[in-house]
Image: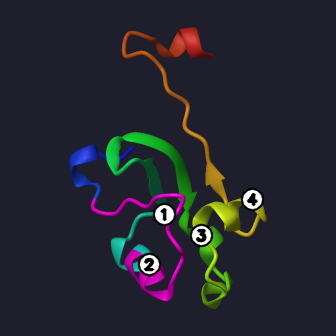
């Protein structure tokens, strides 16, 4: 997992997926991009898998949420655990 201080790119569900955003994802170099809510980097609501953006029609003007609902991109929902939770308790 990447330290939060090293994350340079976040997206929101209401952003339109454009060619410029795809270029930023590529330059970013990470395979997973945090999807945040209310411009708050501490409110991660999903993780966009960068490879799922391959072949997406960026000229459609669709938002990330619309593309997700149409199953054109893949977003994983994060699992939040308390800090005191151990691996043995999870498994």
Q: Of tags 1 and 4, which is closer to the observer?
A: 4
Quarter containing the N terminus: top left
Circle 1 packing at 10 Å, graded few (<14), some (14-19), many (20+), is few
Span of residues in magenta: 8-24
Magenta span contains residue 20: yes
Task: Identify the secondary structure beneath mark 1.
Answer: loop
Is disc 4 surrounded by few (<14), some (14 to 19) or many (20+) residues within 10 Å? few
Spatial distance from mark 3 to mark 1, Cα to Cα?
Answer: 20 Å
Residue 65 included in the magenta stretch of the image: no
Q: Where is residue 68 in the image (x, y as percent from the top left)?
A: 69, 61
Q: Position of residue 59 (x, y in %)?
A: 62, 90
Tag 4–tag 2 contact (CB < 8 Å): no
Of marks 3 and 1, which one's residue comes earlier in the chain?
A: 1
Residue occupying image coordinates x 68% and y 65%: 66
63 up-or-down from 41: above or below: below
Question: CA gap, disc 2 to disc 1?
Answer: 14 Å
The C terminus is located in which quarter? top right
To which quarter of the image does residue 8 belong? bottom left
According to the picture, the residue beneath numbered tag 2 turns out to be 21
Is tag 3's residue or tag 4's residue first in the polypeptide sequence? 3
Dot 4: element: helix
Q: Compared with residue 57, is residue 49 higher up or lower down, i.e. above or below? A: above
Pick whichever of labels 2 and 1 is earlier in the sequence: 2
Residue bearing the label numbered 1? 31
Q: Measure the alpha-carbon separation of dots 4 and 2.
A: 19 Å
- Give the mark, 1 or 4, whose residue is nearer the N terminus: 1
To which residue does mark 3 refer? 63
């Amino acid at each position: 997992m990447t330290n939060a201080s090293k994350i340079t790119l976040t997206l929101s569900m209401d952003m339109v997926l454009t060619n410029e955003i795809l270029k930023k994802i590529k330059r970013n170099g990470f395979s997973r991009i945090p999807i945040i809510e209310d411009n708050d980097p501490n409110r991660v609501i999903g993780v966009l898998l960068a490879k799922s953006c391959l072949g997406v029609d960026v000229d459609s003007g669709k938002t990330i949420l619309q593309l997700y609902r149409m199953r054109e991109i893949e977003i994983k929902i994060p699992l939040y655990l308390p800090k005191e939770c151990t691996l043995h308790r999870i498994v």
